[in-house]
Image (cartoon, rainbow, N blue to C red):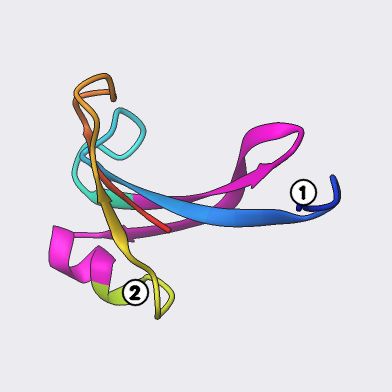
Amino acid sequence: MTAPASESFSMWTVYDHPEDFPHSFVARRWEISAKGCRPTQNFIVGPSLESVRACLPPDLAPVARSELDDPCIVETWL
């Protein structure tokens, strides 16, 4: 069964000191749909990885980074 094209889900990607926040960890929410993946305006900034993880929505599961990911990506949460 295929989901309707209007349906989407979110993922949060956690970054270790990305260029736009060189002194922080950041989690950014991305929206995934049949049209593709796009960033949203939702993000969490914190001084540590643990502080950012603590602010993520509950009931998410972590996915390890791929070797092909940008080096500042720590993990993604679905």
Residue 24: percent from left, percent from top: 22, 49
Q: Secondary structure at mark 1?
A: loop
- Which residue extends farthest bottom? 58
At horizontal 23% and vertical 37% (from top left) the residue drawn is 65
Q: Secondary structure at mark 2?
A: helix
Q: What's the residue type where badge 1 is placed?
A: Thr
Q: Give the Cα separation between the discs numbered 1 and 2.
A: 32 Å
Residue 75: percent from left, percent from top: 25, 46
Q: Residues within 10 Å of mark 2 (few under 14, many from 20)?
A: few
At horizontal 36% and vertical 53% (from top left) the residue drawn is 27
Q: Which mark is residue 2?
A: 1
Q: What's the residue type where badge 2 is placed?
A: Cys
Q: Residues within 10 Å of mark 1 (few under 14, many from 20)?
A: few
At horizontal 63% and vertical 36% (from top left) the residue drawn is 38
Instruction: Report if residue 10 is visible in the image.
Output: yes
Query: In the rendered image, which residue does mark 2 sit on?
Result: 55
Residue 11: percent from left, percent from top: 48, 53
Asked whether, in this view, residue 44 is left or right of residue 70, the answer is right
Q: Quadrant of the C terminus?
A: bottom left
